[in-house]
Image (cartoon, rainbow, N blue to C red):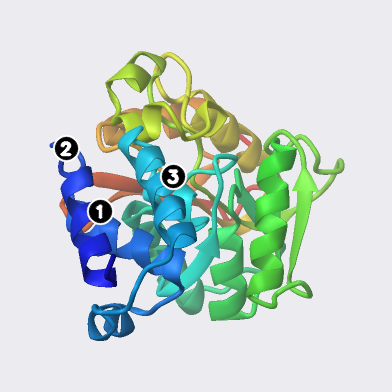
Amino acid sequence: MRLSTLYQDAIRELRQDPDIENPELDARLLVQHVTGLGRTELFLQGDRPVGREESDRLRQLLHRRLRREPLQYILGSCEFWSRTFLVSPAVLIPRPETEFLLEHVLSTLRKAPVAGPVVDLCTGSGVIAVILALELGLTVTGVDISLDALAMARSNIRLHGVEDRVSLVGGDLLSWCRPGARLGCIVSNPPYVKADDIQTLQPEVRDWEPLLALSGGERGLDIIERIIRDGAGLLVPGGWLFLEIGADQGESVMELVAATAPGGFEEVRVLADWAGRPRVLQARKTKNMTGNG
């Protein structure tokens, strides 16, 4: 069998499931993964013979994809912020929404640098912590309750060479902080999907991504509420809080800030993403207060 035939056969096989959105792209990336060829090489070497080992390996990967396992988990990596990050079913697959969160965090911190430690809660694969360290040279602490997620984050920290700037803590949100601790910035992509909505998600998400990193409880706000409440007491005056939120949660999180930390924050805004949907909660610790109000 020729390489070009293998590729076309892979496309046809993936097209068996009409809900796989881009069978051509998935087939190409899987063939590249199996053969070790780049995109240009794949097409230039279309007449190259394919051995049994390569074809059998591809067949196994196609079977996994047809079971709706995310392509990123099959490949073991994904592209984020124009960089490659390692991923596994222990962590969420980084998405464009989180790139929007990061873009705003970077823009804000460049204009108003923080005077205390930076914390990335629910760090998962560690993409937020790594990018903050790379782009701003910040020292960041990544926190996650999942030991498997922390192992993946550690791999990405090594991959991008920021071991001297990113440390990891196993803990439940901010409960690991010592009494009297003061933080300069809290950033998080927390679980925010309503529990009843989990079953409505695409199979790639519902059946494969970690429930612990998806479900925000009955209202989708359980973790967000805890971060707001505890963050109000731990941030230094003028410190920043940035949270990724669900597209239907803008009004709810504004109400949550007012109810959970009355007077504790100023410059409270919900930012719309590139598609015009509520996506990021921004709040700044009130400068003339040291407690949570």
Rendering quarter of residue 44:
bottom left
- Residue that mark 1 sits on: 10
Q: Earlier in the sequence, mark 3 or mark 1?
A: 1
Q: Depth check: give the residue in front, 292 or 29.
A: 29
- Please provide percent x and percent y for residue 122: 60, 43
Q: Mark 1 or mark 2: which comes first in sequence?
A: 1
Q: Which image quadrant: the C terminus?
A: top right
Residue 16: give its label: 2
Q: Secondary structure at mark 3?
A: helix
Closer to the camera in the image, 278 or 10: 10
Q: Disc 1 marks which amino acid? A: Ala
Q: CA distance from mark 1 to mark 2?
A: 10 Å
Residue type for callout 2: Gln
The residue that appears at 49% across and 46% down in the rendered structure is 189
Residue 173 makes an appearance in the image:
yes
Quarter occupied by residue 144: top right
Residue at the spot x=43%, y=13% of the render? Answer: 218
Task: Kindly report the distance in space between the C-alpha atoms of the residues bearing marks 3 and 1.
Answer: 11 Å
Q: Which residue is mark 3?
A: 60
Instruction: Where is residue 104? Give x, y as percent.
Output: 38, 65
Q: Give coordinates of residue 134: x percent, y percent.
A: 58, 78
In which quadrant of the rendered view does residue 255 lie? Answer: top left
- Type of the residue with mark 3: Gln
The residue furthest right is 179
